[in-house]
Amino acid sequence: MITIKNLLSLEGSPEELNLASDENIEIDGSGLIALPALIDPHVHFRIPGNSEKEDWRCASQAAIFGGVTTVFDMPNNNPPIVDSSSLLKKKEEINRQLDEVDIPLRYHLYLGADKDHFSEIRKCSSLVCGLKIYMGSSTGTLLIDDDQSLDTCFREAAKADLLVAVHAEDECCMRNNLSHYKNESSPAIHSKIRSPEVAQKATEKAISLAAKYKARLIILHMSTAKEVELVRMAKARGLSVYAETSPHHLFLNTKAYDKWGCKVQVNPPIRETRDQEALWKGIKEGVIDTIGTDHAPHTLAEKEQQYGCAPSGIPGIEFLLPLLLNAYNQEKLSLRDIIKLCRKKIELIYRIPSNNDWILVDINKEQNLEDHQLKTKCSWSPYGDMNLKGWPVYTICNGRIFNVERKTKDLVAL
Ligand code: NCD
Ligand code: ZN
């Protein structure tokens, strides 16, 4: 049994926890608040194919240190995960790596939509948390860029009652923009090539197909005011349309290019402050349902290349909770909002059973986290210079308790 006493109660959080465990551990929780552990429904842990960027040995530690005990991993691997055999092979390798580091991280996998594998949608529906459709190209080769294939994906997913999760950027619209900016080399151009209209067009298309087939749909990493309005209208029509946003869209904007260059190049791109404001409003009003980090690590060497060569993606799983707790301290959202966005709504939308994982946080602890302290294999982040208030101290995952204060180099289970 793990017993934690004397906890601070805020917004109805418990004063004491008694959790089933093989070990007998008692902790004095004075000064700490217990919150349900977070789910990150959008990560790229890079297995198979790109272990130079990330692997599950490092990423599972990054997750636990970040107060995340469940992740949903994306299929844009090498080879891409488009059928049951690649899915099962991936699972075996993940389990091997998690065993090696002895971290009981919970995970679910996405199936990637692919034009040559439509029949796998139904076959794999009970093995995955959703069907990921790349409507625009990003890292990897997965892409559904014609209307007929997209229609088939929605039809098959609806038949299998499988959640459709879209990367909503319209490939054609993006290519058209690209031709206008061919000779520009500033990273900031990324936000113009992948303009708000690129996202809007794809989101409109996805919502109309969700309506046509009564499919359940989530718009991933939503970044613009326009999309918030589209999802608001879809919900008002009674459609099962949901929305995710990401920490970099909430906490970074186009000003970040000056400092970070291609390091903050991500798809969909960082936006203007008015879009950020619309996202916060969307959270407050329940139009945005979830936050996923889109933890998409690339090596420093890759990200230090010039615009056009550098790949898109930002790592974020270690900063999700501190960024949100810091926002709580700034009165931008409540602890209940955090639990809703990063746990409760995800369980409902993805239909996964609840667990008894918890985090104990010190809401007043202030620090910044430098690159050398990070657990992600890529060892960098664009949040290292932010002094954030509110950090996890313990993470309880699957009956095990980990001290996550970063006092030691490795993750220690008590
Ligand atoms: C992701 C990656 O690198 O896997 N990159 C990104 O910019 N978000 C791919 C993706 O989800 O688009
Ligand atoms: Zn992603």
Image (tube, rainbow, N blue to C red):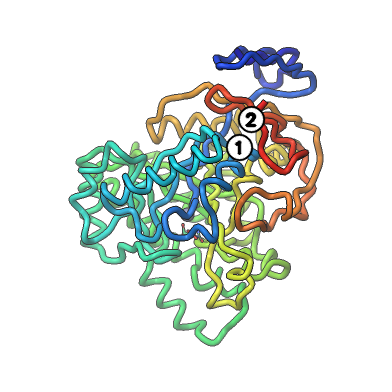
Residue 188 in percent (x, y) is at: 61, 72
Q: Which residue is mark 2?
A: 395
Q: Relative to residue 256, is residue 31 depicted above or below?
A: above
| Residue sitting at x 35%, y 38% | 240
Mark 1 residue crowding within 10 angstroms, few (<14) / some (14–19) / many (20+): many
| Residue 237 in view in this figure | no
Q: Which residue is mark 1?
A: 64
| Residue sitting at x 35%, y 44% | 217
Whether the residues at callouts 2 and 1 have beta carbons within 8 Å, the answer is yes
**Dot 2 lies on which element?**
strand
Residue 315 in percent (x, y) is at: 59, 54
| Residue sitting at x 55%, y 22% | 399
Q: How many marks?
A: 2
Image-quadrant location for residue 179? bottom left
| Residue sitting at x 52%, y 40% | 100
**Dot 1 lies on which element?**
helix
- Locate residue 136 relative to residue 390 in the image: left or right: left
